[in-house]
Amino acid sequence: MKAVEITSFGAPDVLRLAERPDPVAGAGELLIRVAASGVNRPDVLQRTGNYPVPPGASDIPGLEVAGVIVSGDAAAMGQAGLKVGDRVCALVAGGGYAELCVAPVGQCLPVPGGLSDVEAASLPETFFTVWSNVFDRVRLQKGETLLIQGGSSGIGVTAIQLAKAMGATVLVTAGSDEKCAACLALGADHAINYKSSDFAEEVKKLTDGKGVNVILDMVAGSYVAREIGCLAEDGRLVFIAVQGGTKAEFNAGLVLRKRLTITGSTLRPRPLEFKTAIASALREKVWPLIGSGVIKPVIHSTFAAADAAGAHTLMESNQHIGKIVLTW
């Protein structure tokens, strides 16, 4: 099969199309002929040597794919209601940038009706991440207010739509007026251009000084002190990345007085059982919303797999709104 390799750690041009042996599905797994592969920030971190591959995972980058089942564990597929020939999308621990990809049956979901392969490939990584963190970990409730840092990112456009569908008020930050407009078009109630405004001050104004109930943060670093300041009582802050740095100084007294919860998680190293449970929740509660068009994939650009370097260059430019996808 053809696959995109990381020939050495470095800039996007270290990504090369190469020949690899076809993978074989084992117990509890299936083999997908990949039509499209999602591109995500962790892929960039892996390419630069800052996100080690979990033990046993493929060294080929790529955490989400969509395509057709070509073989697999018949019993496991039967229990999941899947069969050879079905169109699926899947979350994987690696190996997504390839013509063939092995995935655990429990991490595969049927492609929602009406979606293209490109649209389907954009779903797993962000939907698994947002559901796990915003709804399972910090339990955003109907009627609460969520602040999303980076509302125009792949995670952001997913979180906006999911939170609105679940009855929350949504505030976002984004780095341009164009990105803010895109977030509002997706359903965000308010969008703050963090380059021209102090998001913490704007949040206080928009919430009449009460603050937000939940913050979904991909930045950390210097943002943390301001985020703690604009959380409401019993507020929850959840980190899913540390693009702004791993260290922060903040007023711990506010954490005590407002009874705040600070948490975070990474998805890739979690066990199969954990990811299978998320897949089950998505299939029950979210996939019908996608199938009915209430929630829609947001695709910024597609690239031929041979131009994975171009996709990574765009990702690093932060100019995209929504997802970037490779096609085979």
Image: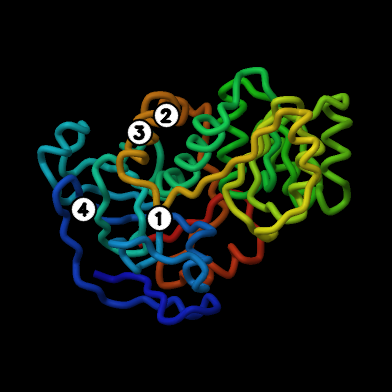
C-alpha distance separating marks 4 and 1: 15 Å
Disc 2 secondary structure class = helix
Structure colour scheme: rainbow
Judging depth in this view, the residue of 68 and 65 nearest the camera is 65
Judge depth for marks 4 and 1 and give the one in front. 1
User: Which of disc 2 and disc 4 is earlier in sequence?
Assistant: 4
User: Which of disc 4 and disc 3 is earlier in sequence?
Assistant: 4
Judge depth for marks 4 and 2 and give the one in front. 4
Disc 3 secondary structure class = helix
| Residue 327 location (% of width, % of height) | 40, 60
Judge left or right: residue 142 versus residue 86: right
Residue annotated with mark 2: 291
| Residue 250 location (% of width, % of height) | 78, 47
User: Which of disc 3 and disc 1 is earlier in sequence?
Assistant: 1
Residue projecting furthest to the left? 74
Q: Count residues near mark 3 (Cα–Cα under 10 Å), then give few for <14, some for 14-19, many for 20+.
A: some
Judging depth in this view, the residue of 197 and 27 nearest the camera is 27
Judging depth in this view, the residue of 40 and 322 nearest the camera is 40
Residue annotated with mark 3: 277
C-alpha distance separating marks 3 and 4: 21 Å
User: Which of disc 1 and disc 2 is earlier in sequence?
Assistant: 1
C-alpha distance separating marks 4 and 2: 24 Å
Disc 4 secondary structure class = strand
Q: Quadrant of residue 159?
A: top right
Q: Residue at x 52, y 73 (%)?
A: 48
User: Which of disc 3 and disc 2 is earlier in sequence?
Assistant: 3
Q: Count residues near mark 1 (Cα–Cα under 10 Å), then give few for <14, some for 14-19, many for 20+.
A: many
User: Which of disc 1 and disc 4 is earlier in sequence?
Assistant: 4
